[in-house]
Amino acid sequence: MHSMTPLGVKPKLNEEGFNKRISLLLDHEEEIVEFQTVYRRADGSLYPVEVHLQLIKDVGEPVFLAIAIDITDRKAAEEKLTKYAEELKEANEKLKSLDRMKNEFLSNVSHELKTPLVSIEGYSEAIRGEMLGVLNDKQKKAMDTVIRNADRLERLINSILYVSIEESGNMKYYFKPIQIADVINHSVLDMISQAESRGLNINNEVPDNLPLIQGDDGKLIQVMDNLIGNAIKFTPSGEITITAREDGSNLHAEVSDTGVGIPSEYIDNLFDRFYQGDGSTKRKYGGTGLGLHISKLIVEAHNGKIWAKSEEGVGATIHVTLPKKSQKPSNIN
């Protein structure tokens, strides 16, 4: 570099820009000035360099030390990285578009499925209630199966609808003072036939005089339906017990079962969307892996918490805490 003039290291850096950098050194504002430019080879070709410029003598005629580092490889890597980032951004936008199309499709299909399902449920209940004629025992049992599976299909459709609406950012909650016992009683009535069909007892030990909570009763019924339904699904024999109590500024509800339990390595991911442990769990017990995820979203929208405790082979307990009425949720619509 000793044979180069200052302008020799900056064929694409204008005089004013270079002088500003020199002034920083002469005024002792900086000890070293770094900048990127291009250097001209003897054959006239250019290549990118990073220049480190330092003042080593400021008495009389100033003397500068300039170290130019060839950054050709770095620039090539940066260009590749920039190109990759642009391609990744484009791919991400395509994925977002596909995800929106998927949500719209699921929402439309779910709405289309709900329309005939309402008729199926209505006529099934009318037949089972013998409003259209007397049934024998076999017919009653058959209609119980139809109604039970129609209820299961409705919960599946509601789960798909919930996820698609939640992802679109259009989910609305309608909060009002409610009694948690009313929510749980409703869910027990929803699920009792399913439990009885598997020979299971549901013990509802929730007192009806607990403090009120500020909540969306429809959404909280969906939570309890999911929790009780999960307990039934994973309990081959025994019982499901539901309790609720005051716990400081919250109400604390528990849904416990005597089922197969949850392996400890699955607990942390239990509330993730579509999570069902290993593949054998899905094959054996079915389901979409949405119920607990949706329950978590709803509980958190109420400023509450949900978690699980379990011992494999003994059973599981899902805990839910919800603030008492004096503590209003922050996202009331």
Image (cartoon, rainbow, N blue to C red):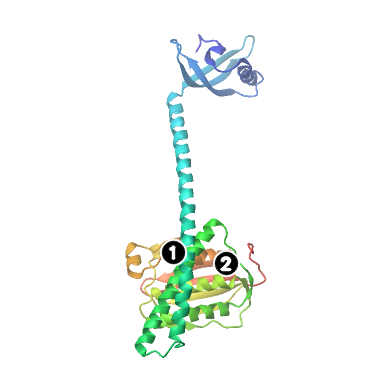
Q: Position of residue 93 (x, y in %)?
A: 49, 45
Quadrant housing residue 141 = bottom left
Residue 116: mark in rendering: none
Nearer-the-camera pick, 326 or 83:
83
Above or below for 33 versus 97:
above
Q: Which residue is mark 1?
A: 270
User: In the rendered structure, which amino acid carries the disc numbered 1?
Assistant: Leu
User: In the rendered structure, are the residues bearing label 1 and label 2 in contact, judged by CB atoms less than 8 Å apart?
Assistant: no
Q: Which mark is residue 304?
A: 2
Q: Quadrant of residue 72?
A: top left
Closer to us: 268 or 152: 152
Residue 67's spot in the image, x, y percent? 50, 19
How many tags in the picture? 2
Residue 212 is situated, as x and y percent measured from the top left of the image, at 63, 76
Q: Could you tell me residue 252's position as x and y percent?
A: 55, 74
The image quadrant where one finds the C terminus is: bottom right
Q: Is residue 228 above or below residue 332?
A: below
Residue type at tag 2: Gly
Marks 1 and 2, the one that precedes in the sequence: 1
- Sort mark 1 into few (<14), some (14-19) or many (20+) by Cα contacts within 10 Å: some
